[in-house]
Amino acid sequence: MNWDKDVIGFDVETSGERHEYALQPWRVPSAWITVAAFTRGATSTGVIRPSQNLLRRTFEKVIEQDLFVCGWNITFDCSWLISSGLEDVAFKLNWLDSMLL
């Protein structure tokens, strides 16, 4: 593992037609990402109801720059990318889970 890589922070917040769906990514389209948040250095950006296209373009840039994607319980966030049709992108990313560090 190359520890010299730069890091981008990532987090999703979710909702659904029923309250419990927010924790169940397999419920798409009855559940959805309400906010995607990104942090790199001192810059933070939050996107309300991000489109699949926006997430794909963002993470393709992350892959091109060979960054680590860091979050808390990142398995949850990654599972939402997969259920949103971005499995190919999710499996190319370098994930770091702060919960496990």
Image: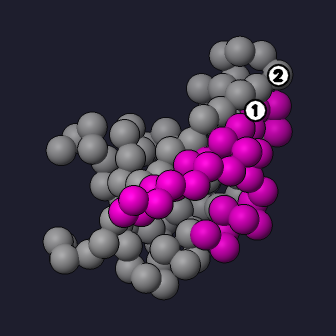
Determine which quarter of the picture holds residue 74.
top left
- Horizontal and vertical percent for residue 79? 55, 45
Could you tell me which residue is drawn at 75 percent across and 32 percent down? 31
Query: Residue flagged by tag 2: what amino acid is it?
Result: Glu
- Could you tell me if residue 26 is visible in this image? no
Relative vertical location of residue 93 with respect to residue 65 in this rendering, above or below: above
The answer to whether the residues at label 1 and label 2 have Cβ atoms under 8 Å apart is yes
Span colored in magenta: 29-58
Could you tell me which residue is drawn at 82 percent across and 31 percent down? 30
Residue at image mark 2:
17
Could you tell me which residue is drawn at 70 percent across and 23 percent down? 21
Determine which quarter of the picture holds residue 23.
top right
Q: Quadrant of the C terminus?
A: top left
Residue at image mark 1:
31
Please report whichever mark, 1 or 2, sits nearer to the chain's N-terminal start. 2
- Horizontal and vertical percent for residue 66? 38, 79
Q: Secondary structure at mark 2?
A: loop
Residue closer to the observer: 88 or 50: 50
Q: Secondary structure at mark 1?
A: strand
